[in-house]
Image (tube, rainbow, N blue to C red):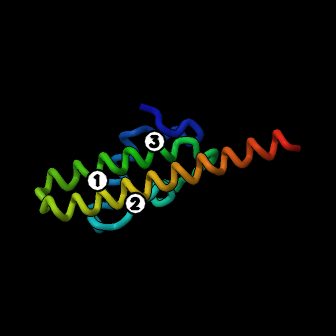
Amino acid sequence: MLVCSCNYITDKDIKAVINELLDEDCWQLIVPGKVYHAMGKRGRCCGCFPNVVDLIIKTTAEYHAARKTEEIKVVNFMERLKQFHEEQKAALAERRQTMLAARRAG
């Protein structure tokens, strides 16, 4: 499935990079910018980043499940990652609301 139409990147491409990053350090925080950098790409419109974060969360969970990592370590890490994702979504929504309000006012 095509995830990033600006760079023509598929979900398989993204999952492969995430797995490579996890092989290097399975506890690192992986964000869309890091994934794109590893592919030699840049986010252009960045509209795909929420979907990339979802892929990071899913792929990271699958990675640790396949390696039978201790459940408590995975849960703590995944909860922190999900919390970060929710905070970023809320910040994006707030920025959009501010921009809309500014357009209406001006």
Viewer-nearest residue: 38 or 76: 76
Split into 4 quadrants, where in the image is the C terminus? top right
Q: Residue 60: which disc?
A: 1
Q: Does residue 25 lie above or below 18 as drawn?
A: below
Residue topped by disc 2: 30
Viewer-nearest residue: 82 or 53: 82
User: Which element carries disc 2, helix, strand or loop?
Assistant: loop
Q: Residue at x 29, y 57 (%)?
A: 78
Residue 23, image x, y percentages: 26, 62
Residue 33, image x, y percentages: 51, 58
Q: Amino acid at mark 2?
A: Ile
Instruction: For the residues labelled 1 and 2, say whether their Cβ atoms are less than 8 Å apart.
Output: yes
Q: Horizontal placement of 26 versus 33: left or right?
A: left
The mark that comes first in sequence, 1 or 2, is: 2
Residue 16, image x, y percentages: 33, 49
Instruction: For the residues labelled 2 and 3, say whether their Cβ atoms are less than 8 Å apart.
Output: no
Q: Does residue 9 lie above or below 30 as drawn?
A: above
Q: Residue 46: which disc?
A: none
User: Which element carries disc 3, helix, strand or loop?
Assistant: helix
Crowding around mark 3 (Cα neighbors within 10 Å: few <14, some 14 to 19, many 20+) is some
